[in-house]
Image (cartoon, helix red, strand yellow):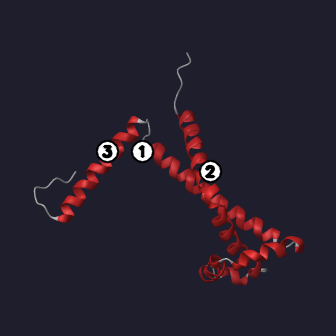
Amino acid sequence: AVVSTQSTGSTRYVTSNCYLIMGLKETLSEKGITVTSLTTCVAIHELLGLSLLLGSWTAFYHLLRHPVLARPLSRLTDHPSYSRKKQWIERKVPLLQRLPNSERLAMSFGMSVVGRKIAAPLLVPLKITCAVFLTQAVSKLETPTNDR
């Protein structure tokens, strides 16, 4: 920890951050949460997010093939995020332009972003809850039991 007798703003900031981090570490250890389990939980949360991204993109890609579903889904293109994300994927992934159905791939990506934004109030707490439960399951698997 950085401890200084000087009263500069940056030193006070660093010192207060160190105390904050030490307090957080104490609180987490009191709850039985280790750095490893916290890292595992964050990694699982990110993997769930990536799975949702790829899963929703794939789902919208296939749903756009059906004319009955394509019409109601086209209303998602009115959302402000749609055009920005569609243009982003076209710009950041130039390989996409060379693939067959590149327009449908870009449209489905934009729609998946909008769909996940709409569902975020449900998805975020669900991802956090799943990450915590999966982390607990992983830690139980790693902890040796003394059943002898």
SS at circle 2? helix
Instruction: Select label 1 or label 3 by which is in front.
Output: 3
Task: Give the x, y percent position of residue 112.
Answer: 69, 69
> Horizontally, is 84 left or right of 101 in the view?
left
Task: Give the x, y percent position of residue 7.
Answer: 13, 61
Determine contact: label 3, label 2, CB under 8 Å: no
Report the residue marked by disc 3: 23
Question: Which callout, 1 or 3, points at the residue further toward the start of the chain?
Answer: 3
> Horizontally, is 52 left or right of 104 in the view?
left
In three-dimensional space, the C-alpha distance between marks 1 and 3, rounded to whole angstroms, equals 14 Å
Query: Which residue is painted at 76% across and 76% down in the image?
Result: 75
Report the residue marked by disc 1: 35
Question: Which callout, 2 or 1, points at the residue further toward the start of the chain?
Answer: 1
Question: Which callout, 3 or 2, points at the residue further toward the start of the chain?
Answer: 3
Q: Amino acid at mark 1?
A: Val
Answer few, some or many: residues within 10 Å of disc 3's Cα (few below 14, many 20 plus, some between 14 and 19).
few
Report the residue marked by disc 2: 126
Q: Amino acid at mark 2?
A: Leu
> Horizontally, is 147 left or right of 17 in the view?
right
Find residue 12 and report its image quarter.
bottom left
Determine contact: label 2, label 1, CB under 8 Å: no
Task: Give the x, y percent position of residue 33.
Answer: 44, 39
Task: Give the x, y percent position of residue 38.
Answer: 46, 46
Answer few, some or many: residues within 10 Å of disc 2's Cα (few below 14, many 20 plus, some between 14 and 19).
some
Query: Which residue is painted at 51% across and 47% down in the image?
Result: 40
